[in-house]
Image (cartoon, helix red, strand yellow):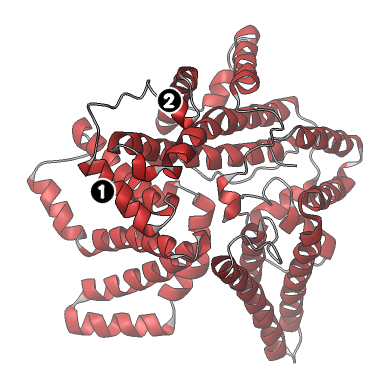
Amino acid sequence: MTYTSFSFFLFLLVTAAVYFLIPLRYRWIVLLTASLGFYGFIALPALPILILEAMISFAGGFVLDRSRSAEKGQRAGKRVFFAVLLSVIIYLAVVKLVLYLRPGTSMLVPVGLSYFSFSNISYLLDVYWKRNEAERNPAKYLLFVSFFPHILQGPIPRYGKLMPQLLEGHPFVYKRVTFGLQLMLYGLFQKLVLADRLAIYVDAVFADYENQYGFVMLAAIFFYAIQIYMDFAGCVNISRGVAELFGIELEENFQQPYFATSVEEYWRRWHITLGAFFRDYVGMPVSTSKVVKKWSRTMREKHGRDAGRLTVTLTALAAVWTCTGFWHGTGLSYLLWALWQGGIIALSQIFKKQLNGMTEALHLTDRSVPFHLFRILRTFVLAGIIPRVVTRAPSVRAAFVIMKHCVSNTGMAQFHLGGGLEQFGWSRIHLEIALIAMLVQLVVSILKERGVSVRQGVASFVLPLRWLIYLALLFAVVLFGIYGPGYDARAFVYMDF
């Protein structure tokens, strides 16, 4: 049962019916039962691991909180807390290492491990830093960790924001329910109509990369950049829409990342909750640690204020991007991917004054449309294209072969995207549908970038027009989604992380 399967929608219908029929104060119990049932249905052998990790984390926060109020035992409480925190982190790291050493290993690798482990880690650290009080009810804490809309692929929640919403018990509100369904429908459109359709072409080209012309590879690389974005954004929109049905707001995870004008900005717009997690729980502790402060003070005394500032910034960047790369994967491909992304951000910090001086000397500003578009295109290539080749190719060697083909064996004379598509599992109708779907996504993204609420805008239309749009989107998903004999929804890409 995945977010795109019929069984999930049946499960959701039953859960919503029960949720809105019982008294408000007991509705969190329905969500807990549904969350455990959902996870058990998709990964029953892993359910005990989810519960065990949650209970260990709950105990760690509880012991720490209780030890603070006692005259004795504070040191013992901290020892228990750090033992719990390290156990969660070490288990996550060991699983990542096992997956690297033995790809395909399923033992002790629960679905959504990264997402519920990050929920536990953020909760423990927030209790330690006194941002939140420890939860007193283990069942309620288990609901926070296992809440089914975010358990598979995020967004990564924060206890202080999500927990009160889960326990509140929300009444049925027609507008909120319709908005949730609207967001779910759009997520299904992104996933089934666009991402899964592009995946057919991308998979076929990359499977035979040595025999493809450069322009065919360039098309596949571009389509892959769109595919992975729509796959992940579609899943998050489904998740947020499901949560909204119950009156619960999950955090937004994307803000038009392909409109970013720098790599640093790109990563503030892409997988926002993951970036915020590493910033708050890795970057900030590293940058404020005694060791880094000492390094910064030494560099400042020897080389000036800017050197001291850069020492803190670059050390935090190194820690954050080491963790980010390790989270995405443990092979050489992801090491190079992290070095590339983090390295570009580091270089932009090191040469910040020089770059600003150059743009000022050339009288270039974002008010210049051509320069603004150039920065968007540059960022898209640097953050969304080149590193994607490294992680999508079968190996690092294959990635370099592909990039070499793109510039030395273009096959421009033989290339035309509309022909020969059958060898890649496409027909011309696949291409046309993909292009129309990308155009729809582009228009929506431009409107959102300009601050227009597309959802509110559609909701303000007269009833016939509003439902015409809803039905058109529904028919697009039903008629043009990628299905087939024995079809099971293609796994979401980011579930592998």
- Against 322, residue 409 (above or below) is above
Element at label 1: helix
> Mark 2 is on which residue type?
Leu
Callout 2–callout 1 Cβ contact below 8 Å: no
Q: Nearer the viewer, residue 48 or 200?
A: 200
Q: Which residue is mark 1?
A: 404
Q: Earlier in the sequence, mark 2 or mark 1?
A: 1
Q: CA distance from mark 2 to mark 1?
A: 23 Å
x, y percent for residue 191: 57, 34
- Residue 88, located in which quarter of the rendered image? bottom right
x, y percent for residue 288: 43, 76
In this image, 404 relative to 455: left or right?
A: left
In this image, 7 relative to 477: left or right?
A: right
Q: Which residue is mark 2?
A: 421
- Residue 52, located in which quarter of the rendered image? bottom right
Q: Nearer the viewer, residue 417 or 268?
A: 417
Instruction: Report the residue at 68% width, 61% height from top.
Output: 106
> Mark 1 is on which residue type?
Lys
Q: Is residue 40 visible?
A: yes
- Residue 235, located in which quarter of the rendered image? top right
Q: Quarter holding the C terminus?
A: bottom right
Element at label 2: helix
Please, which residue is most extreme toward the top here? 464
Q: Nearer the viewer, residue 179 or 116?
A: 116
In this image, 46 relative to 348: left or right?
A: right
Q: Quarter holding the N terminus?
A: top right
Label 2 Cα crowd, 10 Å radius (few <14 / some 14-19 / many 20+):
some
- Against 69, residue 374 (above or below) is above
